[in-house]
Image (cartoon, grey):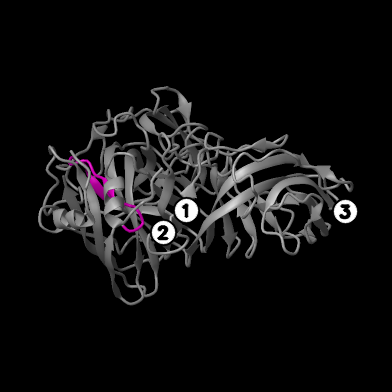
Amino acid sequence: MAAITDISDIANLLTDGTAQHAGYFIDNRIQAAAAVATIAGQYTSLWRYNKTNGGNGAIPGAAAVCDRTTLGALGQANASGAKTLWALGWEGAATQPGVMVLYDRLLHVGGLSGTVTTAQTVGGTLTRNTGGVGNEIWVEIYTAVGTTATTITASYTNQAGTTGRTTPAVVFGGTGAREESRMIRLPLADGDTGVQAVASVTHTTTSTAGSYGVTIAKPLCRGFIEAQGACFYRDFLGGTPALPEIVDDACLAMMWLASNTNAPRIETVLHMVEK
Amino acid sequence: MAAFTTYAETKSLTETGGRSVVFSVLKSNGSNANLQLNSTWSRMQFNNDTTNIPSTAAALSSTTAGALAQHPKLPGTLTADLWLTELEFSYGHVIPGTRYTAFLFDRLSHQGGLSGTSTSEQTTNLPTAALTRHTSGEGVMAFLEVYVNLGSTSTTATISYTNQAGTAGQISKELAITNNLTNLVDGFTPFCLADGDTGVRSVESITLAASTLTAGNFGITLAKRIAMFPLDTGCMVERQPLREMIFGGAVVKIDPAACLMLAIISGSTASTGVMCAQGRIGLAEK
């Protein structure tokens, strides 16, 4: 693995036959049905949305590591040999205003119930970014939970390997925090900067079991769609973050921070080189 | 064919040794109450060509009538590689402040003559013509393209296609044909593929779940995305600054026989007036 030296090096890497331009169109449908309405100010998972390549992400069961071959992932190839894959830029357009978030979906679990009031096991073992710095805990709803708003916490291991850490309580259940495809970020305890593992989640009943899960994600970058029909392009050469590394087997996926109640249709491409 | 060695070489090959394709497109149809389709993709016609409606399946090239690159045409064949290195664009529209995104595609094949009222499996003018570029189908997208308005009754459509591995009989996810969104002229809507598929080699048939109540005319277009760029009409006319594709890593290879086309995604439903766009695609060959 060698460092990228300068813009001339970039020109060479883009045209030597190894560059990747991985992307897809994401429709606002999940299989045969229209996606449920988004909520302004809330995150929506695009994991299960229909895509022009790669397929829909499945609802997880037991805790499982996600990788680049997991259905729903962007599906980039690993860098060859001992090289490193770097993102040079990211582009996206959407039919609705909002923010696209590109993340590495490290691990997910499903089958959790909105009516169980004892600690529900998450578990699993990370295989990427195992140190945990920058990893985030997200609740991901697959079938709507109940209308009773409550709060949820997670018990986790932080970036220093300290177990039994507890996230501050956030709203779970009720309008805006119960719908299919909703994603709810669980902030970390004071002083923590990451997550190595999540042991369990706990909440009081939302009155409907539904089905939800926990996803451990490492966000890579964000793209802002300022208006309907607009696009963005992030240049990682001149902007931030500087050349994000796409680690081997990264399960690249997206979530959407909505500005209105209309589920978006999206076109996106990630440009990568290896060295 | 060799990779670029320096940034200076990239610039030099574009500016002095390359090909600048100048294009002009417009979209005007004062009688069409849905001139622009809010929140969906639509095709921009070269020279407002509303008559060049495909029928039998045809593979397309740089010499196809309606291809974007006319000044000059792409060469068809070339011993060097052709790379997209620059884009610039100017755009005029009657609605100030409208946001659009334009997409540059290589239009690989098309056909028409499909009906918005037939609910049986339609094979008219199908299968699509054999691809002459990107022949594996990897990264190739299939679009439902509307040439004459379909009916106002919303429905869904699926295609039976051969994927990038040559496996026939794959069935796409349902595509929504929605009134005033994807059922109108120039609607250009991509199909989402079956789980695990990454491209389309050919489309064998299409099936509507229900009639739209107007036959209209639509077809299947196979295309490969090349680039996207923003169109912001902060005023009546906006000129986008030159975009050097190296910044952001969007330098991509373009086939010298590509049939370039533009599609837009609109942020407006203005019912009258002309949308016009002119620009330059900078290409370097090595």
Residue under label 3: A204
Relative to A175, A54 lies left or right: left
Task: Magenta stretch: give its range.
Answer: B247-262
Residue contact between numbered discs 1 and 2, judged by CB atoms under 8 Å? yes
Q: Mark 2 lies on which chain?
A: A
Question: Which structural element holds mark 1?
Answer: loop
- Residue A2 position, x and y percent, is 38, 46
Earlier in the chain: of badge 2 and badge 3, it is 3
Look at the image and say whether residue B255 sits in the magenta stretch.
yes
Q: In which quarter of the image is residue A121?
A: top right
Relative to A28, B247 lies left or right: left
Question: Which structural element holds mark 3?
Answer: loop
Spatial separation of the CA atoms under disc 1 and disc 3: 39 Å
Q: How crowded is mark 1: few (under 14 residues within 10 Å), some or many (20 or more)?
A: some
Residue under label 1: A244
Which of the two discs, 2 and 3, sits closer to the camera? 2
Q: Which of A31 and B227 is in front in this view?
A: B227
Residue under label 2: A236
Asked if badges 2 and 3 are on one and the same chain, I answer yes
- At label 3, which amino acid type do we have? Thr
- Residue A158 position, x and y percent, is 72, 52
